[in-house]
Image: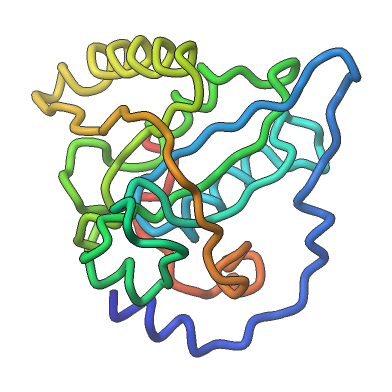
Amino acid sequence: MLGRLKALLSLGTPINPSAFRATMSTSTSQPQVATFASGCFWGVQHIFLKHFPPTENKGILNTAVGYTGGKEDVQDPSYEQVCSGQTNHAEAVRIEFDPAVVSYDELVEFFYRTHDPTTSNRQGADQGTQYRSAIFYNTPEQETVAKRVTEEVQKKHFDPIGKKIVTEIVPAGKWWDAEDYHQLYLFKNPMGYQCPTHRLHW
């Protein structure tokens, strides 16, 4: 947390946001939305965009960092409120994607590859409910896929090392975009704080 607060003091460099957006590959399919939480949302957004850059038409159309999964009576929470742990919101990434190019299955597996899903309410030194591992499914089909991929990843990557995935798989609720300075933070601030668990684990 201290590292993140220090990082917020940096001004960052200007970027062109349009470089991080893309259009659908065809007019016959509709964009879908995936919502993931796996620790500090700066790093989650950063690693997805690094490996699925919209400029290379790899399926991700747009992303946003924000807050979800919190108490229903808390409207439009601020970063400070979420960090207090009192709202129960998770720091999350909302990914708009083209299912004709990248499947939801692939995105769920990539989500698991890029953090530690075996720690409850923690990624690296970041601790608190806002840093929990969660898949917020947007359709019944996404729920089915998320549970199946979770079982496959558990069996292949975590059973052999005696660890258990603790990722929540829950319905997507109200989404709140985070403040502008959080959006694409690590592209604006390449030397900014990044949780060490946000890397390819296999």
Q: Nearer the viewer, residue 173 or 54?
A: 173
Which residue is rendered at x = 71% and y = 80% of the image? 13
Query: By what rule are the colours in the image chosen?
Result: rainbow
Q: Which residue is pictured at 50% across the width and 19% down the height?
A: 139
Q: Position of residue 167 (x, y in %)?
A: 25, 33
Picture layout, residue 36 above or below residue 72: above
Q: Quadrant of residue 170?
A: top left
Is the residue 134 above or below the residue 3 in the image?
above
Residue 202 visible in rendering: no
Q: Residue 89: x and y, percent?
A: 32, 55
Residue at x-position 38% and y-position 14%: 149
User: Splitting the image into 4 quarters, where does residue 41 fall?
Assistant: bottom left
Image coordinates of residue 95 in percent, x first then y, are 60, 39
Q: How many marks?
A: 0
- Nearer-the-camera pick, 170 or 120: 170
Expressed as whole percent of the image width and height from the top left, the position of residue 148 reads 35, 10
Which corner quadrant holds the N terminus? bottom left
**Left or right: where 15 falls relative to 113:** right
Query: What residue sits 64% from the left and 46% below the top?
Result: 49
Q: Residue lying furthest right in this view?
A: 27
Residue 107 vs residue 111: left or right?
right
The single residue placed furthest to the left in the displayed view is 162
The C terminus, quarter of image: top left
Please say whether residue 189 is visible from this viewpoint.
yes
Q: State whether residue 74 is above or below residue 168.
A: below
